[in-house]
Image (spheres, rainbow, N blue to C red):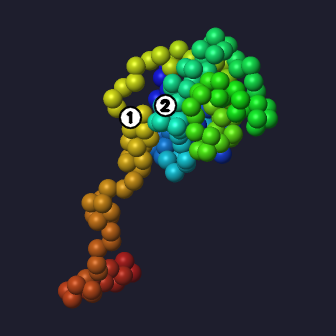
Amino acid sequence: MSLDKILSIAGKPGLYKIVTQTRSGFLAESLLDKKRITVNVHSNVSVLSEIAMYTLTEEVPLREVLKKVREKEDGKQTSISHKDSKDALEEYFFAVLPDYDEDRVYPSDIKKVIQWYNILQGNDLLASLDEVVEDKPATDKVEVAQTKTTANPSAIKSAAPKASASKKGGSIKNTSARKAQ
């Protein structure tokens, strides 16, 4: 499974993988407890393949940062917990990515990277870091889901109630007299 199908959902702990699309969004499965949830298209969702970390020279894709963590840890869980102190997290991350921008990368970002790496490692998904990145952005599935749920302007026009005969200036049909007989 590639990072294109792994998500972070705002307000929900951990990472999720896309299972299938629905009319109103998609079905996602937690990588922590395997519970499935439906995610509305209006939810704030981040696809891991689209996330990057700031460095002093450029933005480094999260895929590359996770590869560097894997190299440092030899594919095992990190030697540091995401719950460790701010100083310990920054020191660890400096060893992984020495030129990261300390002004724009917050300790909460470092915590997420470490937690996400450990979740991916625990689910044997680190091999997905080596997969070739497709030209097509991963957010296309989410965008497709959003376009399916938004109404077509022509459908709105045809679904609008038509003006009654009295507004058109034509004759008025009274069907109540026929129903009473």
* Most distant residue in the left direction: 170
Badge 2 element: strand
- Tell me the number on the disc at residue 137: 1
> From the viewer's perspective, is residue 97 above or below residue 25?
above
Query: Residue 10 at x, y = what percent?
Result: 61, 45
Which label's residue is closer to the chain start, 1 or 2? 2
Query: Residue 56 at x, y = what percent?
Result: 52, 37
- Tell me the number on the disc at residue 100: none
Asked where in the image residue 155 lies, by quadrant, the reply is bottom left
Position of 123 compared to 155: left or right?
A: right
- Amino acid carrying label 2: it is Pro
Residue annotated with mark 2: 61
Q: Residue at x 52, y 51 (%)?
A: 42
Asked where in the image residue 163 lies, by quadrant, the reply is bottom left
Q: Which residue is drawn at 55% across and 26% down?
A: 65
Residue 31 shows in this picture: no
> From the viewer's perspective, is residue 164 above or below residue 122?
below
Q: Please tell me which residue lies in front, 119 or 174.
A: 119
